[in-house]
Image (cartoon, helix red, strand yellow):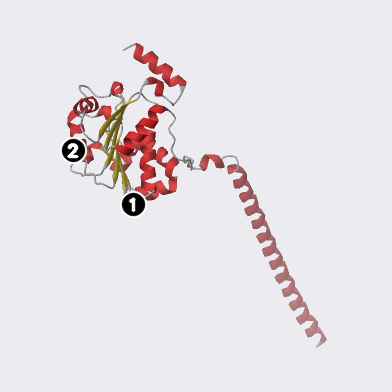
Amino acid sequence: MAKKSRAHNSIRNSSLNRKKQSEGRRNKHQCNKQKVHHLETADIYTLHSNRTHLETVYTTPRSHWPLEAKTASQKRYISAIKNNCLTFGIGPAGTGKSYCAAALAAQALETGRIERIILTRPAVEAGEQLGFLPGTVDEKFAVYVDIFRDMLNERLGSGAVEYNLRHGRIVAAPLAFMRGKTFGGDTFVILDEAQNTSIEQMKMFLTRIGEGCKVVVNGDIRQSDIRGSNGLADAIDRVRGVPGVHVHRFERDDIVRSGLVRALIDRYEACV
């Protein structure tokens, strides 16, 4: 009986030892896995730690200051937009034509004076043929109106701009898509780069204006990228004396972008 008891105890102890060894190996394996995972995580963290700024999408910081004119000419231009149904802003680059119009439109949308902003321009490249652009119509046209997105982001904030774009309160569309539309009294419309319109296109656009609508047409007659007569120069001659229409002319001295731009425009215009 004693021999049987000792044999039984030996078998039980051997089983317990094997079980402890198995648990020890399993715990050691799990510990090694945790160490490897920790090292992998540390390696990944180290790999990306110096380039996090590259993965941040840039958005124009919002300005909480009200629109203020930088020049006397800008002040008259802003006043003309507020007091007229149709305002033409013509003059050289860098005078703030587009920015002032976009800022006033954003302000009107934010305060509820209007329900929709329409941004449009002719889809004309500046001396280059970009060829076929992939994507939907909105994606194709986005390259032409990115400047307005930056302006509106500054005045409204990028979140508000994205929301209003999704819900149709800010609309960006090629000029060719304006045919058949009527701009209602709750709409602020901006036609930019109008020097690239044909006479027929300008006529089509101007005859979309409804009662109480606010329309701004901007451009620089000297920088037309189309052949033949342009619709902006033709329209300015035709609208002279029409009630509710104002033509504002910016000069070289009104350029606020930089002194270098003024100097470059002088050099280019001297060669014309």
- Residue placed at 23% from the left, 27% from the top? 236
Q: Which sits in the foreground, 225 or 67?
A: 67
Q: In which quarter of the image is the C terminus?
A: top left
The location of residue 220, given as percent across then percent down, is: 31, 25
Mark 1 Cα-neighbour bin, 10 Å: few <14, some 14–19, many ≥20: few
Please identify, in this view, whether the residue under mark 1 or under mark 2 is nearer the observer: 2
The location of residue 205, given as percent across then percent down, is: 21, 36
Extreme-top residue of the structure = 271
Q: Residue 251 sits in which quadrant?
A: top left
Q: Which sits in the foreground, 189 or 30?
A: 189
Q: Which amino acid does label 1 sit on?
A: His
- Residue placed at 35% from the left, 31% from the top? 77
Q: Is mark 2 on a helix, strand or loop?
A: loop
Q: What residue type is labelled 2?
A: Thr
Measured along the vertical axis of the image, is residue 223 above or below residue 148?
A: above
Measure how far apart labels 1 and 2 are at the Cα level: 26 Å
Residue 167's disc number? 1
Q: Decide: marks 1, 2 in contact (CB < 8 A)?
A: no
Extreme-right residue of the structure = 2
Left or right of 7? Residue 126 is left
The location of residue 234, given as percent across then percent down, is: 20, 25
Asked whether residue 125 is in view, the answer is no
Q: Which sits in the foreground, 76 or 115?
A: 76
First in sequence, mark 1 or 2: give its number: 1
Q: Which sits in the foreground, 142 or 109?
A: 109
Q: Quadrant of the N terminus?
A: bottom right
Measured along the vertical axis of the image, is residue 91 above or below residue 66?
A: above
Residue 207's disc number? 2
Asked whether residue 234 is in view, the answer is yes
Q: Residue 250 sits in which quadrant?
A: top left
